[in-house]
C-alpha cells in the first residue's frame, strides 16, 4: 500500500499535467516519482 504522501505526489502530478502547468514543475514531479519508484495507472 502506498503512503499518503506518495498518493498525493501522484495526484499532484496528474493534476499538473491535466492543467498544463509549468513544464519545470511537472519535470520535478516526474523525477520524484521516478526516485521513489512509484507506479500508477491512469484512467
Image (cartoon, rainbow, N blue to C red):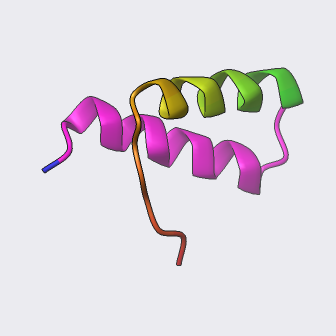
The structure residue drawn at horizontal position 32% and vertical position 35%, both measured from the top left corner, is: 6
Please identify the quarter of the rendering in which residue 5 is found: top left
Position of 3 with respect to 8 (left or right) is left
The structure residue drawn at horizontal position 60% and vertical position 52%, both measured from the top left corner, is: 14
State the image coordinates of residue 28 (x, y, percent, origin top left).
67, 21
- What's drawn in magenta, residue-wise? 2-22
The structure residue drawn at horizontal position 43% and vertical position 59%, both measured from the top left corner, is: 40
State the image coordinates of residue 19 (x, y, percent, origin top left).
78, 50
Most distant residue in the left direction: 1
Position of 16 relative to 27 (above/below): below
State the image coordinates of residue 11 (x, y, percent, origin top left).
47, 47
Position of 34 with respect to 28 (left or right) is left
The structure residue drawn at horizontal position 48% and vertical position 24%, both measured from the top left corner, is: 35
Position of 24 relative to 18 (above/below): above
18 in magenta: yes
Please identify the quarter of the rendering in which residue 22 is found: top right
Residue situated in front as seen by the camera: 20 or 37 = 37
The majority secondary structure of the magenta stretch comes to helix
Please identify the quarter of the rendering in which residue 13 is found: top right
6 in magenta: yes
Position of 4 relative to 39 (above/below): above
Q: How many marks?
A: 0
Position of 23 with respect to 13 (left or right) is right
Amino acid at each position: 500500500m502506498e503512503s499518503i504522501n506518495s498518493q498525493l505526489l501522484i495526484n499532484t502530478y496528474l493534476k499538473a499535467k491535466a492543467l498544463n502547468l509549468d513544464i519545470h514543475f511537472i519535470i520535478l514531479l516526474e523525477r520524484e516519482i521516478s526516485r521513489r519508484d512509484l507506479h500508477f495507472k491512469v484512467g
